[in-house]
Amino acid sequence: MKVTVVGSHLCPDTLYALNKLVEAKADIEFKNLSASLPDLKVYLQLRDNEAMYETVKANGGIGIPCFILEDGTKTMDLNEVLK
């Protein structure tokens, strides 16, 4: 399973997800929005254009980690990714 994780090394939820994905032997590409301007741009593009972020924004959340699966599916649900 290949998965792109958009998150931050400063976020405990992102670190937890990365550890679970490593345990599941996933092929991980990590977009670290706290350490890379190009990765921050990927995150902002998602946050500005994906409907799944409407509730997150309305509640003042950040919305990380976000997972992009190899088929293009985008989710913030780690359990969905691990299925």
Image: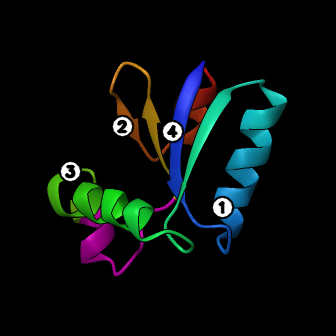
Q: Is residue 60 left or right of residue 20?
A: left
Q: What residue sits right under mark 4 in the picture?
A: 4
Q: Residues within 10 Å of mark 4 (few under 14, many from 20)?
A: some
* Secondary structure mostly taken by the magenta-highlighted segment of the chain: loop
| Three-letter amino acid code at the position of disc 3 | Glu
x, y (%) of residue 16? 75, 54
**Does residue 61 belong to the magenta stretch?**
yes
Q: Nearer the viewer, mark 4 or mark 2?
A: 4
| Three-letter amino acid code at the position of disc 2 | Lys
Q: Which badge, 4 or 2, is on the more N-terminal residue? A: 4
Q: What is the magenta range? A: 55-64
Q: Residues within 10 Å of mark 1 (few under 14, many from 20)?
A: some
Q: Which badge, 3 or 1, is on the more N-terminal residue? A: 1
Secondary structure state at the residue bearing disc 4: strand
Q: What residue sits right under mark 2 in the picture?
A: 74
Q: Which badge, 3 or 4, is on the more N-terminal residue? A: 4
Tell whether label 2 touches label 3 (CB within 8 Å).
yes
Residue 20, relative to residue 57: is it above or below? Answer: above
Quadrant of the drawing holding the N terminus: top right
Distance (Cα) linking label 4 and label 1? 15 Å
Distance (Cα) linking label 3 and label 1? 20 Å
Write the residue at 27% across / 55% down: 46
Tell me, for residue 81, which label it has, or none.
none
| Three-letter amino acid code at the position of disc 1 | Asp
Distance (Cα) linking label 2 and label 1? 17 Å
Residue 32, relative to residue 51: is it above or below? Answer: below
Q: What residue sits right under mark 3 in the picture?
A: 50
Residue 23, relative to residue 1: is it above or below? Answer: below
Tell me, for residue 13, which label it has, or none.
1
Tell whether label 4 touches label 3 (CB within 8 Å).
no
Q: Residue 15's image quarter?
A: bottom right
Distance (Cα) linking label 3 and label 2? 9 Å
